[in-house]
Image (spheres, helix red, strand yellow):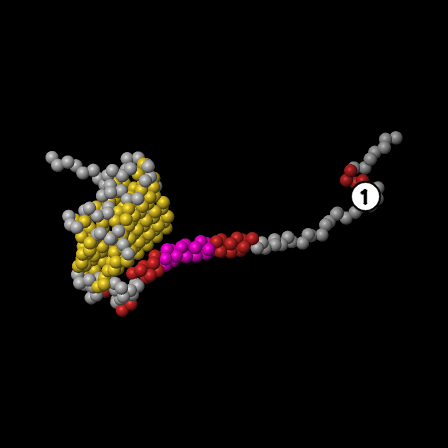
Amino acid sequence: MENKQPPFEDRGQNQNVPTTPPFTTPNPPLYQKKKSNAVPIVIAIIFAITAIIIASIICFFAFLRGGISELAKNHIFDNDSSYIEVNTSAEFDTDNILELDIEWIDGSVNLQYYDGEKIYIEENGNGKHPMCYKIDGTTLKIDEYRNKAKINIKTASKDLTVKLPLTYKANKIDISVVSASVAANGLNVGKLDFETVSGNGEFQFAVSPVEIDTESVSGEAKIILPEGVTGYSASWETVSGSLITNGFTDNSNSARYGDGSVLIDGDSVSGNLIISKAETKKAAA
């Protein structure tokens, strides 16, 4: 007898096979992404670092500006009764004067060499009070006014001319100015110190010096070394300024040239230090 199986779709019903409801799982709870605190922390750190950098820059500017300004106040604004007022001009023997110390506000300072035997100083301008001087040991100190506590310096622009004998060599010349330009030609000095707030200085040397120090805020210092200079070595720190060199045959635009014998130290806020070599004089045809 043939054993016939019922069709597949009928097996469950014909054989009374119990059926089970389809398997279901409960719906899982929706995943809620946990908010991260990393982003605001990173932003806060960035802001903090930025604030520190800005504060550091401001402090650095303030330090340099304040330092030089304080130096100017200490020297230029001192009320020293030992200074002698000068009526337009004066002259001095060079025998016991080894250093010059010049402090000036608003105007210009010019150093020249001439065929004479004495140091000669002269002022021109609209200042109501005369310049003054004193000899401190071997240093001739020249100042724009004696009693500055009662003077409005902004309304008193004056020009100073200093003439030095061609045969005279100073051990040191120290020039501090505020809102004044400085020009010096034919310098013969061992060391030059130049400090300025809002003023430029140009110094041309007839003989190579030993050392040059410059400090400037919103001012430029230009150093013109003699044609026969054997070398220089410059140490330069600046905010918003550049070291520029011109006229040298090797290592141009560098902080060192030749044997590095002339030591140049410069600090600047918003100002350049320019080191140049004097141009070769062409023989007359």
> Who's the residue at 32% across and 40% down the image?
261
> Who's the residue at 80% across and 46% down the image?
19
Toward the front, the furthest residue is: 95
Identity, as a three-letter code, of the amino acid under mark 1: Gln
> Who's the residue at 18% across and 52% down the image?
118
Look at the numbered disc 1 and give the secondary structure of its residue.
Answer: helix
Q: Position of residue 140 (x, y in %)?
A: 25, 56
Q: Which residues are magenta?
A: 50-67
When asked about the image quadrant of residue 86, the answer is: bottom left
Toward the bottom, the furthest residue is: 150
Q: Position of residue 143 (x, y in %)?
A: 25, 60
Does 20 sit left or right of 281 as displayed?
right
Does 169 sit left or right of 3 as displayed?
left
Out of 222 and 204, give the one closest to the viewer. 204
Q: Is residue 279 above or below residue 35?
A: above
* Residue 52 in view in this figure: yes
> Who's the residue at 19% across and 46% down the image?
167
* Residue 240 in view in this figure: no
The overriding secondary structure of the stretch rendered in magenta is helix
When asked about the image quadrant of residue 145, the answer is: bottom left
Q: Is residue 111 above or below residue 155?
A: above
Residue 139 on the magenta segment:
no
How many numbered dots are placed on residues in this image?
Answer: 1
Out of 157 and 123, give the one closest to the viewer. 123
Q: Circle 1 is placed at which residue position?
A: 13
* Quadrant, the N terminus: top right
Residue 57 on the magenta segment:
yes
Does 34 sit left or right of 14 as displayed?
left
Q: Position of residue 36 (x, y in %)?
A: 58, 54
CA neighbours of label 1 inside 10 A, class few (<14), some (14 to 19), many (20+): few
